[in-house]
Image: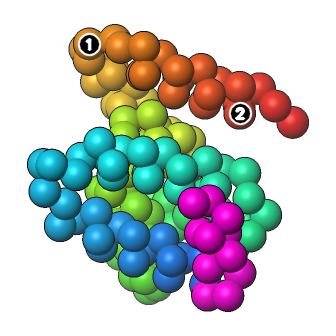
Amino acid sequence: GSFVIRKLCILLSPSKVYLIFAKVFESVVDDDLEFVHLLIQTLNLILLTAPEVASLRNELKESWKMRVLYFNQSENGEENAVFFALYRSWCHNPIAALSLCLLSEAYPLASELVTRLSHVTVTVGLLMEIDKLVQLLESP
């Protein structure tokens, strides 16, 4: 699973790989939501930790900064599109969406997500995902 995705990111541009996944996730039917949830969890872990996608992490940070500086009027709309395309897909997994916002330094959006998460029914799976995110944040 993750080995194949990491290898694809080496062979192709990481943003292309992730944007293709995001496009596929947009057409998901209700029967596949659990699969998409798990796949986004895997993609998110790769995004946060793998050296192969460092360029995508930098692109995401820049895309949010450009949006803030130019009020979504950035000359490079493609960089802006990466964050928003991933964000729409990552919303299938709220903790992954939160980590994407934190990674991209989209703190106002992260704050809104945390507020909305406070109204969600807490499950063991959700707690495990939050725990994993906290461990990643606390690690060097």
Q: Residue at x 26, y 13 (%)?
A: 121
Query: Are the residues flagged by discs 1 and 2 in contact, CB closer than 8 Å?
Result: no
Q: Position of residue 3 (x, y in %)?
A: 67, 65
Under circle 2, the secondary element is helix
Is residue 139 part of the magenta span, yes or no? no
The relative height of residue 127 versus residue 76 in the rendered view (above or below) is above
Q: Position of residue 56 (x, y in %)?
A: 62, 69
Q: Which residue is mark 1?
A: 121
- Looking at the image, tell me whether mark 1 or mark 2 is earlier in sequence order: 1
What's the magenta bit mostly, secondary-structure-wise?
helix
Q: Which segment is the magenta one?
A: 1-12
Q: Residue at x 51, y 77 (%)?
A: 17
Instruction: Judge the density around disc 2: few (<14), some (14-19), many (≥20) Cα neighbours within 10 Å.
Output: some
The relative height of residue 36 versus residue 28 in the rendered view (above or below) is above
Residue 69 appears anywhere in the view: no
Residue 33 appears anywhere in the view: yes
Q: Position of residue 139 (x, y in %)?
A: 81, 31
The relative height of residue 33 versus residue 26 in the rendered view (above or below) is above
83 or 129: nearer the eye?
129
Q: Amino acid at mark 1?
A: Thr
Cα distance between the residues tagged 1 and 2 = 23 Å
Q: Quadrant of the N terminus?
A: bottom right
Q: Quadrant of residue 37?
A: top left
Is residue 5 part of the magenta span, yes or no? yes
Q: Which residue is mark 2?
A: 136
Q: Where residue 24 is drawn, which disc sits there?
A: none
